[in-house]
Image: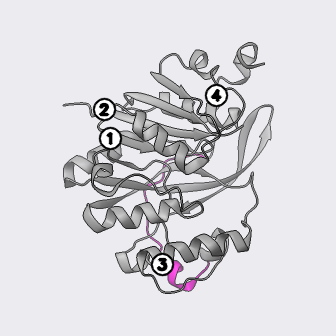
Amino acid sequence: MMIEPISVVIPTYNRPLFLCELLESIIRQTHRPLEVIIVNDGGENVDFVKHLYPELEMTILNPFPKPHHVTARNLGIQAARGSYILLCDDDDMLLPQHIEESMKLMREENVDFVHSDAEIFDFSVENGVRVPMSQKLFAYHYTLDDMKKFSTYIPSGTIYRRDIHQVIGHLDPEMNNYWDWDFFLRVYETFNIRRLPMATVLYAYGHTSKSAAPAKMRHYLDKLCAKHNLNPLPTKNFWTLLQEPELLARKASSYRTWDGQPIRSRYNRGTDLHS
């Protein structure tokens, strides 16, 4: 069977421990990607990760001036050599079967874009390791109309055909807070999207504030609504939205394999490389 060439694109900013845990999760994949592209979004130097994870073909981009996170993703996509792109935030992780199962679904259903369910976890950092304190399944059915009201799309772990960008362009840097929702809706207009009903993404939630500035969110949400001709949408934080009756009714079952154990990276074993 042909092994599809996948480029993993990771924007990062001053989270070396989290980044290394993500890289650890990537080397554990049953389907190893062609390359990993890390885009340093104006943070501390992370070149040391090449030495920590020599198994990965890795490119680290250090653009100047600071590009900001959406543009950072675009720079990584533009540098990619693979036929497929895998997007992942630097603080999230992937379970070992994630790439293999995503690509299996893509082949079997001849689709262009696959995203998966997730385990949302809160954590504390103990002895240089993120230790999960709780986990919650994030899995929802949806239609396009549903997604125009409440987004249940987590971009980390998404795998899609790179040539999608030749048709719809790149991620919109003007959509700062809702770039992922915007991207999903743009892809849906032309391409086939499938949800993988497996919780193979570990989505970190707990190291930042659980609610962004309302004025900032309102500005970008209004831009999203205008761009996609959506009805006015409420500004609510992530946790509040998950309790909406309409979202609760969309809850779906999902195959879960994570035992809640931390993914220990090589970060602390390589202190001489990043001190």
The CA span between labels 3 and 2 is 36 Å
Indicate whether 89 appears above or below 119: above
> Residue 76 appears at what percent x and percent y?
47, 38
Do callouts 3 and 2 mark residues in contact (Cβ within 8 Å)? no
Indicate whether 1 appears above or below 226: above
Which numbered disc, 1 or 2, marks the residue that appears first in the sequence?
2
The CA span between labels 1 and 2 is 6 Å
> Residue 261 appears at what percent x and percent y?
63, 41
Indicate whether 198 appears above or below 125: below
**Label 1 sits on what residue type?**
Tyr
> Residue 159 appears at what percent x and percent y?
37, 47
Discs 3/1, front: 3
Name the residue rendered at 67%, 55% in the picture: 205
Discs 4/3, front: 3
Q: To which quarter of the image does residue 2 belong? A: top left
Which numbered disc, 3 or 2, marks the residue that appears first in the sequence?
2
| Residue identified by numbered label 2 | 5
Element at badge 1?
A: strand
Q: To which quarter of the image does residue 86 belong? A: top left
Q: Which residues are magenta?
A: 243-259
Name the residue rendered at 54%, 62% in the picture: 175
Do callouts 4 and 3 mark residues in contact (Cβ within 8 Å)? no
Element at badge 3?
A: helix
| Residue identified by numbered label 1 | 84
Discs 2/4, front: 2
| Residue identified by numbered label 3 | 226
> Residue 12 appears at what percent x and percent y?
62, 39
Discs 4/1, front: 1
Which numbered disc, 3 or 1, marks the residue that appears first in the sequence?
1
| Residue identified by numbered label 4 | 265
